[in-house]
Image (cartoon, helix red, strand yellow):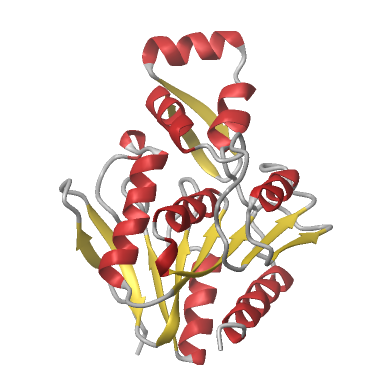
Amino acid sequence: MPIFPLPPARLALADGQTLAYHRSPGDQPGVVFLGGFTSDMTGIKATTLEHWCRRRGQAFVRFDYSGHGASSGRFADGTIGQWAQEALAVLDELTEGPQLLVGSSMGAWLMLLAALAQPQRIAGLLGLACAADFTEYLLWEQLDEPQREQLQRERLIRLPCPYGEPYLITLKLIEEAKAHQLLNRPEIRIDGPVRLIHGMADADVPWRTSLQVMEKLTSPDVRLILVKDGEHTLSRDQDLRLLTRTLGEMLEGQG
């Protein structure tokens, strides 16, 4: 008989949104995966981590932000602050005890914001192709003057996406994100273990972004792992092995 995937469970939020999620029971620290901009929890990194955590007996949660995947809401209504609050809601409502956050691209920015908001819940952070502050240097600063004028006039612009449908970029997304920028701060006050993995062949987010984050973090326990031929998604077999090996080392260090 064919095996059909289970439908996701749903977390109701105070603002009326519902977040789709999958949760596996297991030991602490639990692992929570935070996906990237326009991605969803069915991607290869999220599902690889779920299977790896299940085999290990480690608690695990993957979920979709509002406007993403199977969750409610419109993507164009989302902001960095809203998605960060949703990550905190998942942390509060769906996990217990210390958690190790794994964030991919935008998810790595959100994991940093979550750790700043609730440091007592964070056992460690593992960022992949960290896209902290990307709304500024990858969106706003890359627009030419006619595009900026269109965005300010229409409050929405469509930009080509190498992975599928065009990106819907709103003026609200870019303006609201300014309150959550990290790279313009003198320091990022996170003191636990942090691992950052970035491909040097990343055509979307410069690997030096992860270097900047490492330099800003107050924690002495930070390592940046550069993959010379690694691209943005870090989804090749060898990238996934590096991901699970690094996560395993971090979890072993919790003992």
Kindly indicate the quadrant of the structure image that contains residue 6. Answer: bottom left
Instruction: Give the x, y percent position of residue 138.
Output: 61, 32
Is residue 236 or residue 211 the one in the foreground?
A: 211
Q: Residue reaching furthest right?
A: 228
Q: Is residue 225 above or below residue 185?
A: below
Residue drawn at the location 39% of the way across and 49% of the way down: 84
Q: Is residue 78 above or below residue 223?
A: above
Kindly indicate the quadrant of the structure image that contains residue 22. Answer: bottom left
Residue drawn at the location 71% of the way across and 56% of the way down: 198
Residue drawn at the location 38% of the way across and 26% of the way down: 172
Total of numbered circles in the picture? 0
Instruction: Give the x, y percent position of residue 141.
Output: 62, 22
Could you tell whether 58 is left or right of 198 in the image? left
Could you tell whether 16 is left or right of 248 in the image? left
Could you tell whether 23 is left or right of 115 in the image? left
Instruction: Give the x, y percent position of residue 133.
Output: 56, 38
* Residue 89 appears in the picture as rendered: yes
Q: Dividing the image into 4 quarters, which one contains the C terminus?
A: bottom right
Is residue 181 or residue 31 the one in the foreground?
A: 181
Is residue 235 or residue 15 the one in the foreground?
A: 15
Could you tell whether 30 is left or right of 187 in the image? left
Q: Is residue 168 above or below residue 241?
A: above
Instruction: Give the x, y percent position of residue 225.
Output: 76, 63
* Residue 42 appears in the picture as rendered: no
Q: Dividing the image into 4 quarters, which one contains the N terminus?
A: bottom left
